[in-house]
Image: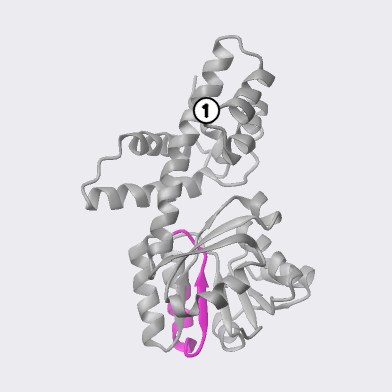
């Protein structure tokens, strides 16, 4: 793989992924629409920063994006498409699979190749280089994608054609959203019945048959009221809205996911969008 790698999108996840690429000697430049953020990140990682996206693409062989939503991906890729010939694009955003396929087709028409590569894992997993990446796109180029993403992930899994990585990610986040609601209820139920916090924590993180890396991360946050962000309410809601739309289009009834969606909408309305998904505990009385 050629080594001029650009990371575009320096949010909570993107900035940490950029750091991992830089530590592995694989990062050449960064771009963010916030020029100060790009400049500061580039200075810290000792790479080049760009304020012009077209220039950034022209000077890169591989472009990795970590963006917020469908609109952000469409906007950024529309600016990059003209210079796509011969380039490899890896979009790690969680967006609608249909949007991703449309963008991938545009990139293909312009002579480039694009993969969807959404991640399972929070900012903590990025820092531990323990992400799981679910990849959709042309099988023949997957080895190059895996080689690069292994700098920030311990598992890079090929799912299928374009869009399939995102469908797999939405399966995960449907489960995660519903699981978080149940986890919060379990904590609240235990407290209301006089179970000490340390016992609740042990039950849900050590003894329960439903224990998981998520319960290990989120139960202590619920107990302590520490809602510093690892994965935000806003992002969880965005993903659950995609699930809800796709379920309606395919006539799939998802009662648990629908209830969880209503809770996350409620939390957004209360102004908790930038807090961690553990703040779902706030919805309980």
Does the magenta run of residues contain 90?
yes
Where is residue 275? Give x, y as percent: 58, 41
Where is residue 30? Give x, y as percent: 65, 74
Q: Quadrant of residue 265?
A: top left
The structure's colour scheme is one colour
* Residue farthest along the left direction in this orientation: 251
Q: Quadrant of residue 212?
A: top right
35 up-or-down from 171: above or below: below
Does the magenta run of residues contain 83?
yes
Label tally: 1
Q: Which of 108 and 30 is in front in this view?
A: 108
**Residue density around tag 1, few if under 14, some if 14–19, many if 20 or more, within 10 Å:** many
Q: Nearer the viewer, residue 165 or 263?
A: 165
Q: Nearer the viewer, residue 107 or 170?
A: 170
Where is residue 240? Give x, y as percent: 40, 46
Identity of the residue drawn at 46% across and 58% down: 94
Q: Nearer the viewer, residue 129 or 34?
A: 129
Which residues lie in the magenta part?
76-94
Identity of the residue drawn at 51% across and 43% down: 233
104 up-or-down from 83: above or below: above
Quick check: 248 left or right of 77? left
The residue indicated by pointer 1 is 184
Quick check: 122 left or right of 164? right
141 up-or-down from 246: above or below: below
* Quarter of the rendering occupied by the N terminus: bottom right
């Amino acid at each position: 793989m050629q080594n001029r790698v650009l990371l575009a999108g320096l949010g909570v996840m993107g900035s940490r992924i950029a750091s991992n690429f830089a530590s592995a000697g694989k990062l050449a430049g960064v771009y963010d629409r916030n020029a100060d953020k790009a400049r500061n990140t580039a200075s810290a990682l000792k790479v080049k920063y760009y304020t012009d996206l077209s220039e950034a693409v022209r000077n890169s062989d591989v472009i990795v994006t970590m963006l917020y939503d469908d609109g952000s991906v469409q906007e950024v890729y529309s600016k990059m498409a003209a210079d796509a010939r011969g380039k490899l694009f890896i979009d790690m955003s969680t967006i609608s699979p249909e949007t991703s396929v449309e963008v991938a087709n545009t990139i293909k028409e312009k002579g480039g190749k694009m993969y969807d590569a959404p991640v399972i894992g929070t900012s903590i997993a990025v820092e531990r280089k323990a992400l799981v990446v679910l990849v959709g796109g042309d099988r023949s180029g997957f080895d190059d994608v895996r080689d690069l993403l292994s700098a920030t992930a311990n598992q890079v899994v090929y799912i299928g054609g374009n869009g399939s990585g995102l469908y797999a990610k939405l399966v995960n986040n449907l489960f995660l959203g519903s699981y978080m609601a149940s986890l919060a209820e379990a904590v609240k139920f235990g407290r209301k019945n006089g179970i000490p916090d340390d016992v609740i924590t042990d039950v849900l993180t050590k003894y329960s048959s439903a224990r998981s890396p998520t319960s290990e991360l989120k139960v202590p946050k619920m107990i302590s009221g520490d809602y510093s962000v690892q994965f935000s309410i806003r992002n969880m809601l965005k993903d659950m809205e995609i699930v809800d739309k796709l379920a309606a289009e395919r006539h799939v009834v998802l009662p648990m996911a629908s209830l969880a969606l209503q809770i996350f909408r409620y939390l957004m309305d209360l102004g908790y969008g930038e807090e961690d998904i553990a703040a779902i505990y706030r919805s309980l009385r």
